[in-house]
């Protein structure tokens, strides 16, 4: 049985868009559509698909230009891209590959071949890229690699570790399906705030479970962290039932297997920067962050704590 994936098809021609949608849905995949490069980026601000089928010849922003911009943005650079083309022009294909396209398909191909090309690209990405299957965010290995790259480049850096408070109790009480919805909500919230208030080069990763990390610059820390701790508590209320919301806590088993009351979920942020100290390794940053996170989680409610140590 073929796995069901979410595929975004981008084509300005209504007839071609309808044709591609019928083909891809026939493979059992979920399909979303966009009709221009601009519409593509608006879509990606809301959700990340498993793969993009991108028309080569579009007015305004061409498929090649869209691909180039996607590969330059950390938030989108790991999305697989297959170019849709009606031409067998070698130059077009080579230029597409130079801009990070993974493969191409044409309308003249048999549907079975198109299906196999999509499956092959997705399989290759899932094997070679360290991405979280739920949030589609870079995983721990990718985070460490990007962090070390910025350290080696001598960049001004703020590393923000994000951890949900009382998530395990919620997961135990409401079930893993609702827990996954909270994780996806958190990823979407962080992505949205970084997009609206951060730098274009900011990097967001998902360590695993309810732990996230983002990389930004020291001057953005208060703006970003302030927005997160103000927005998260209200947004997360949607996942609780009316009774739990009214009483302001839930009842669940603690780590000893005993029933205990737990507050509604909040978010704690631990911030490490090289603004006033030198940071030479990922291990050093992790060690410092671990101490700061303990302080952040010792406080009630959503909050952030910034490393104040100076050389």
Image (cartoon, rainbow, N blue to C red):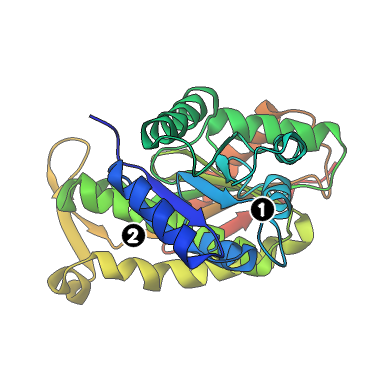
Residue 88 in which image quadrant: top right
Give the x, y percent position of residue 266.
39, 60
Relative placement, left or right, of 178 versus 51 is left
Q: Quadrant of the N terminus?
A: top left
Q: Residue at x 44, y 35 (%)?
A: 114
Q: Residue at x 84, y 37 (%)?
A: 278
Residue 63 marker: 1
Relative placement, left or right, of 62 versus 115 is right
Give the x, y percent position of residue 106.
53, 41
Give the x, y percent position of residue 208.
43, 37
Q: Residue at x 54, y 29 (%)?
A: 129
Is disc 2 surrounded by few (<14), some (14 to 19) or many (20+) residues within 10 Å?
many
Residue 265 marker: 2
Give the x, y percent position of residue 189.
48, 62
Tell me: residue 265, above or below residue 286: below
Relative placement, left or right, of 233 versus 58 is left
Q: Residue at x 19, y 77 (%)?
A: 246
Element carrying mark 1: helix
């Amino acid at each position: 049985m073929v796995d069901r994936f979410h595929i975004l098809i981008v084509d300005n021609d209504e007839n071609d868009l309808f044709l591609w949608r019928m083909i891809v849905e026939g493979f059992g995949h979920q399909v979303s559509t966009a009709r221009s490069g601009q519409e593509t980026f608006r879509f990606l601000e809301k959700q990340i698909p498993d793969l993009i089928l991108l028309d080569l010849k579009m007015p305004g922003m061409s498929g090649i230009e869209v691909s180039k911009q996607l590969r330059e943005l950390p938030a989108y650079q790991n999305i697989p891209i297959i170019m849709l083309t009606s031409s067998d022009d070698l130059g077009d294909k080579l230029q597409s590959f130079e801009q990070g396209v993974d493969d191409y398909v044409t309308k003249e191909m048999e549907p079975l071949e198109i299906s196999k090309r999509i499956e092959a690209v997705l399989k290759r990405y899932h094997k070679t890229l360290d991405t979280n299957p739920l949030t589609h965010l870079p995983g721990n290995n990718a985070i460490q690699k990007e962090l070390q790259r910025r350290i080696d480049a001598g960049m001004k850096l703020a590393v923000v570790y994000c951890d949900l408070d009382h998530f395990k109790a919620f997961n135990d009480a409401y079930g893993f399906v609702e827990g996954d919805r909270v994780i996806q909500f958190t990823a979407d919230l962080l992505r949205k705030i970084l997009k609206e208030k951060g730098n274009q080069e900011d990097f967001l990763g998902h360590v695993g479970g309810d732990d996230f990390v983002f990389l930004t610059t020291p001057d953005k820390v208060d703006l970003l962290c302030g927005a997160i701790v103000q927005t998260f508590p209200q947004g997360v209320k949607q996942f609780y039932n009316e009774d739990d919301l009214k009483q302001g806590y839930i009842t669940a088993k603690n780590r000893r297997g005993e029933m205990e009351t737990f507050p509604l979920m909040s978010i704690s942020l631990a911030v490490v920067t090289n603004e006033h100290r030198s940071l030479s390794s990922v291990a050093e940053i992790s060690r410092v962050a671990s101490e700061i996170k303990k302080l952040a989680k010792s406080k009630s409610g959503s909050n952030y704590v910034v490393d104040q140590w100076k050389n």
